[in-house]
Image: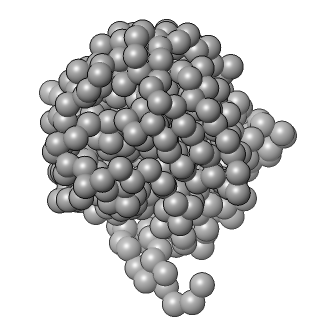
């Protein structure tokens, strides 16, 4: 089994490129199901979830070529409408094929995605939206079965902002007859990006990236070519890494505007972050300062940066309070950071972090994608050697993170461990 070995206390210097956003690429890949013909994506990250999506598209009759950083999805070879459990269980975002399949073929059968290490993440808002568009839905034997001769535009009010729920209904509405209005939508940049793609395909999408989206569906949608936006969470992770390790890094292609909620907090913590070219210059010259953070839907502080920011706060001079409002089980990195010498106390959905003078290397275990990133960047500043196990979590969201950090001066490598 692969692991990441880090020998700490080396500053970061040089340039780190920020790759394409996985959370933008996945729904765009699913949107290819809305049309026939060949679609072409650029700036796609080389991640396990991309390969899983390509395999799922293949099962659904679309030959997909993955040549990172490009992915080509070929024309349809038939009306295949079942997304099997064996693939959906590997990646919750697979549920995003539900809306496109139903809208284009009039029916879909998609496995329920099941549980998740960081919380339940139900799909009830997806189903509510599709029913409002005219679908008949049954949930039987672990599958969602949906039918509709032709979806029709409707007003849909989400009970709470949901990123994948908003995206699924956007794609379904893009082929629905008439106009749809989506209210209380997720406002993440990745939702806005999907809106751009749907407009390229021939739908009329207005308001993507705001809480209210209007969509006028088309009778037929066209294939497209599109370059995926940069990954704001990867960029934020590298910013936190510089905050811990020290040094000066140019993050190429860093999406500064999309990262504003994170950058505000990082600056308060003592980092200098300035726009440079199409990216950001990140430095830490003085001591780390404690900062309180509460996660919230965009444009709030993203839950996907909570673990990395907690790692940063372990060395801040004082107490910081981190409150998690999105997922009920997203402090699983706390015991592992504590093994490295961090002082963290959790109370329900709040973590109290008392800064310490230094961390020490240890053998730690990743429990989810962002937890694994927090342990890697903590290892950059820890004394001695840190071994991060279960890095298959890391590979779901970071392309060759050890190579990118290594080129910037970190003593880091991927190793193979024997046994479980």
In terms of depth relative to the viewer, which is nearer, 369 or 413?
369
**Residue 244 horizontal side relative to residue 419, left or right:** left
Q: Quadrant of residue 133?
A: top right
Q: Residue furthest bottom?
A: 418
- Where residue 2 appears, as percent x and y from the top left, is 45, 77
**Residue furthest to the right:** 347
Q: Is residue 41 left or right of residue 8?
A: left
Q: Position of residue 225 (x, y in %)?
A: 15, 36
Q: Residue at x 36, y 12 (%)?
A: 216
For the residue pair 288 and 237, the one nearer the viewer reads as 237
* Quadrant of the drawing holding the C terminus: bottom right
Residue 262 visible to an observer of this rendering: no
Seen from the viewer's position, the closer of residues 340 and 199 is 199
| Residue 368 on image: x %, y % | 58, 56
Using the rendered view, name the quadrant where residue 408 is placed: bottom left
Q: Residue at x 48, y 49 (%)?
A: 94
| Residue located 28% across and 63% down the image | 403
The answer to whether residue 154 is visible is yes
Colour scheme: one colour
* Residue 42 x/y as whole percent: 18, 43
Foreground pick, 371 / 51: 51
């Amino acid at each position: 089994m692969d692991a990441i070995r880090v020998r700490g206390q080396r500053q970061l210097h040089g340039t780190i490129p920020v790759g394409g956003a996985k959370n933008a690429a996945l729904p765009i890949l699913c949107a290819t199901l809305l049309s026939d013909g060949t679609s072409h994506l650029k700036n796609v990250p080389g991640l396990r979830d991309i390969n899983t999506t390509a395999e799922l598209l293949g099962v659904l009759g679309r030959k997909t070529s993955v040549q990172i950083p490009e992915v080509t999805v070929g024309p349809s070879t038939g009306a295949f409408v079942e997304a099997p459990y064996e693939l959906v269980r590997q990646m919750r975002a697979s549920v995003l094929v539900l809306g496109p399949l139903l809208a284009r073929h009039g029916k879909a059968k998609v496995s329920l995605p099941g549980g998740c290490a960081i919380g339940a993440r139900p799909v009830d808002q997806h189903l509510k939206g599709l029913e409002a568009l005219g679908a008949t839905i049954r949930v039987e034997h672990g599958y969602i079965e949906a039918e509709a001769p032709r979806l029709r535009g409707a007003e849909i009010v989400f009970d709470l902002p949901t990123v994948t729920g908003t995206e699924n209904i956007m794609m379904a509405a893009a082929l629905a007859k008439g106009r749809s209005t989506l209210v209380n939508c997720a406002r993440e940049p990745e939702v806005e990006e999907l809106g751009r793609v749907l407009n390229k395909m021939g739908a009329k999408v207005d308001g993507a990236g705001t809480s209210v989206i209007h969509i006028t569906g088309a009778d037929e949608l066209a294939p497209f070519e599109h370059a995926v936006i940069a990954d704001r969470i990867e960029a934020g992770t590298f910013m936190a890494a510089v905050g811990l390790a020290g040094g000066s890094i140019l993050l190429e292609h860093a999406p500064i505007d999309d990262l504003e909620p994170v950058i505000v907090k990082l600056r308060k913590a003592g980092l200098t972050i300035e726009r440079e070219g199409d990216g950001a210059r990140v430095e830490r010259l003085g001591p780390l300062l404690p900062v309180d953070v509460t996660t919230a839907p965009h444009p709030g502080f993203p839950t996907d940066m909570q673990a990395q920011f907690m790692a940063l706060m372990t060395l801040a001079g004082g107490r910081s309070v981190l409150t998690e409002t999105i997922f009920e089980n997203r402090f699983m990195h706390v015991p592992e950071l504590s093994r490295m010498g961090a002082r963290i106390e959790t109370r329900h959905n709040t973590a109290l972090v008392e800064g310490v003078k230094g961390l020490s290397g240890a053998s730690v275990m990743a429990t989810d994608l962002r937890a694994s990133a927090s342990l890697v960047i903590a290892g950059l500043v820890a004394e001695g050697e840190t071994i991060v196990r279960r890095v298959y979590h890391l590979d779901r969201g970071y392309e060759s993170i050890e190579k990118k950090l290594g080129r910037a001066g970190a003593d880091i490598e991927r190793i193979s461990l024997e046994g479980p």
